[in-house]
Image: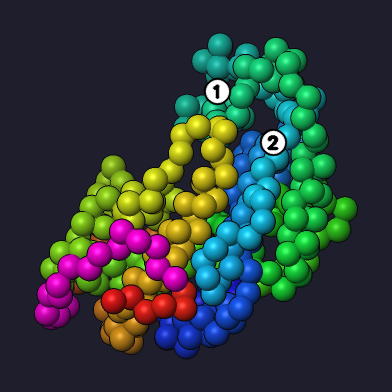
Amino acid sequence: MKLQNLHIDESLQTLERLEASLEGKTLIVVNLKATGLDPKPRYSQITHITAIAVSVNTGEELGAPFNEEAELEIATMSRLKYEDNLKAKDEWPLEKMAVRDWLNASGYDLAAAEAGNTRKPSDLEVAMAFQDFYEEHGTASVLITHNVPFVLDHLNHILPYPMRVSQDIDTLGFARKFFMPLLRLKMTSGHDTSNKIGEKMLDSRGNLDPSTRNLGRAFNVSRSRHRSSAVEDARQLAKVFYKMVGFVRLHRDMLDHPHFKQYATLQSQSRFEDEPIEPELEPEAPLDFEEPVQLDEPVQ
């Protein structure tokens, strides 16, 4: 189900098709970390992959999680030294993230790697092991992650043959096409719970930011800061997806609202900073989103 290229006028039909397509399936929720956005440079590599398998119908986790960190390649270590030298000369552009920045942001134990105290599998071995994990749960399993192109581009760049993924769901695409436009619509109506959720998703410029961190904060889903709990990031993403689906299902009658379509169009153009449209809607009673919402259960 490709949500990134969704036509706004097809929102309700797409949501219904999405729900029907997930019935009885297994979600493979993936969190992949790398040294940059582009997998093509020689120094670019996968550094960590975590994943869990979740039953759509029950919400239960199936089997043991996948959690593998990769050894830094020689090209990556050389790039680190090259960038450090440029920084020492004040020749590195401040607005550009260096490989060290990517590694630090991901929680990679860089000190141990630079000291030569690690013995980990290569990024190719990690990618192939994840491919086996996915296929063990059935090739009909649904791959779900925050930014599908980023994950599949890195995997398919290094794997001997492309991942055979029958269906994928981009939680970032779902947030932009469904959740955020509906959230903004409910916020402008004075809906108390939506305002509380939205306040936790604002970036420094006051715009709604659908990062996994902000979505987790919005739905009170904690995110671990410890490397040893990297699997919790995948669990958080699964819970966030259930929460977003629950919110959208509750307000699905508004998917045909003209302001929803306008908000969704603005979001797809990265223009949510525009002045909000003021729809004439009656405020609703606040809702409790403290517990995960199951796909097969209506929100009360």
Q: Is residue 111 magenta?
A: no
Q: Which residue is mark 2?
A: 69
Question: Could you tell me if residue 172 is visible in this image?
Answer: no
Circle 2 Cα neighbour tier, 10 Å, few/some/many (<14 / 14–19 / ≥20)? some
Q: Main secondary structure of the magenta part?
A: loop
Amino acid found under the numbered disc labelled 1: Trp
Q: What separation in Å lies between label 1 and label 2 (alpha carbons)?
A: 28 Å
Dots 1, 2 in contact, CB < 8 A: no
Quarter of the image for the N terminus: give it.
bottom right
Front position in the image: 189 or 27: 27
**Magenta highlight range:** 279-294
Instruction: Using the image, tell me which numbered label, if any, was put on residue 92.
Output: 1
149 w.r.t. 129: above or below: below
SS category of the residue bearing label 1: loop
> In the current view of this chain or complex, which residue is farthest to the right?
160
Amino acid found under the numbered disc labelled 2: Glu
Residue 272 placement, left or right of 131 = left
75 w.r.t. 224: above or below: above
Q: Which of the two labelled residues, at mark 1 and mark 2, occupies the earlier sequence position?
A: 2
Quarter of the image for the C terminus: give it.
bottom left
Residue 19 placement, left or right of 218 = right
